[in-house]
Image: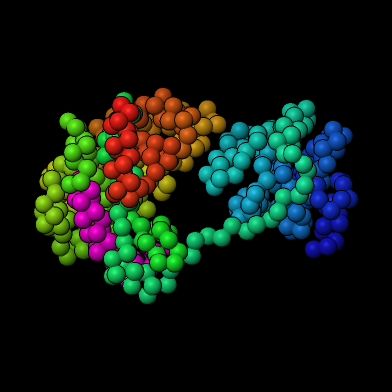
Amino acid sequence: MSSLFSVARSAGSQSAWTPVIVLGGDPAAGSICANALNAALLQTEYLTSLEAYLERATPQVLILDIAPGSLDVCSVIQFIRRIEPAPALILLSAHGPSILRSFAANAKSIGLEILGTLNKPVELDTLVALVQGRLRAFDTLAPAAVVVKIQPTPLPSSEALDLFDAGALEAYLQPKFRLSDLSISGFETLARINHPQLGVLAPGRFLAPLLENGAGPALTLQMLIGAARSRARLARYQGDRAWQYAVNVTADLPVQDNPDWLKQQVESLGMDPANLMIEIPEATLSEDLLIWHRVLTQARLMGIGVSLDDFGCQAANLERLLLLPLTEVKVDRMFLEHAMNDRDARRLLGSINRMIKDLGMLSVVEGVSSADMLSLAIDAGFDYAQGFHLGLPLTLAETEAFVLARNETV
């Protein structure tokens, strides 16, 4: 690896760290970019391999040349998602806007910052301006520390099951808003576990162990109970509009052996079906849609709403819009994130909304995390929205305080 590294860095600085790296398999273009940046006193190295990049401290700007060659540019994107703070990206390509748009969209979807996308041959003045603007955002040019992000580790199965059996599961509520007037239209019921040492845990820490051990139906039932309790406590605040409570159902419900399972649970809780929405995450739908069709049709005939969650994150989901008796479709947050900085993505977001409405369903956009995103969702014409900018997942007591505060300020 050392010989590769010494060859790769010969076009750039010999310092231990450089704030800008050009990485790619096109030596001619890479050297031109590196030389232009160095001429502008922006310390830059050109590297030809991911192995060489791995030996460097994290730069503040990574210029990635999407070109044929020995460098797997997709591996670069996957690698730097594990680095914190990750470098800001500038993408170069001679293969047209669709390649650049696709790479930028995928990088943004995993939280990476895109400074710009440039067609080759590169307009060097534009490249220099992009890098200068980024580096001015730093007080100093000290090297960024490399920190590998640690993904949440699921609890051991025995611990997850013991906590569940001990009643540590709690239903949190995240509000959903009607975009026509920004009023609350209902809440999504979200599972959390109160761990005695680790605090409140999200599903990434306990869901897989519970499902692997057959606890999915019991988990769904607990969320239905949480929705019923929440409705009973919050009904006094809803005014003339009856709030709807959404519950995610798991793929292992006993629907094959007992298609009436959902109906039996709802009736036993004494919950008005009109106040209930069941959400089917796109990723959990089994290949046998006839089974789900039977269960969801039964729910609709009872008056329960049916929502397809995370629409767009899986393949072949357009067919499911036709095959399943849906009330609403919740569009995955990635579409809104892409639309923030991409004109084509904004057109796509509006087209998705119109398609959903043309099929007679309500449209919901997820992931509204800023005022700009909220404006974009409204401009795109969506019926409803959820996201941290509008309301965080809260306990029932915290939700009641949130609702009271809103009522006092309206």
Main SS type for the magenta part? helix
| Magenta residue span | 205-231
**Taking 50 as reference, is 42 above or below it?**
above
Q: Along the line of sight, which residue is nearer the eye, 320 or 255?
A: 255
Name the side, left or right, on which 256 lies relative to 320.
left
Residue at the extreme bottom = 158
Q: Along the line of sight, which residue is nearer the eye, 218 or 316?
A: 218
Residue in the image at 86% along x and 57% along y? 6
**Taking 306 as reference, is 342 above or below it?**
above
Residue in the image at 84% along x and 53% along y? 16
**Residue 212, can we see it?**
no
Say if the magenta span includes residue 399.
Answer: no
Residue 364 in the image: x percent, y percent?
Answer: 34, 36
Residue 167 in the image: x percent, y percent?
Answer: 28, 66
**Taking 36 as reference, is 303 above or below it?**
below
Residue 261 in the image: x percent, y percent?
Answer: 16, 59
Residue in the image at 56% along x and 60% along y? 150
Name the side, left or right, on which 220 lies relative to 299.
right
Name the side, left or right, on which 49 lies relative to 211.
right
Say if the magenta span includes residue 210.
Answer: yes
Name which quarter of the figure residue 275 lies in.
top left
Name which quarter of the figure residue 98 lies in.
top right
Residue in the image at 44% along x and 67% along y? 197
Of the 4 image quadrants, the one containing the C terminus is top left
Q: Along the line of sight, which residue is nearer the eye, 29 or 114?
A: 114
Of the 4 image quadrants, the one containing the N terminus is bottom right
Residue 211 in the image: x percent, y percent?
Answer: 33, 65
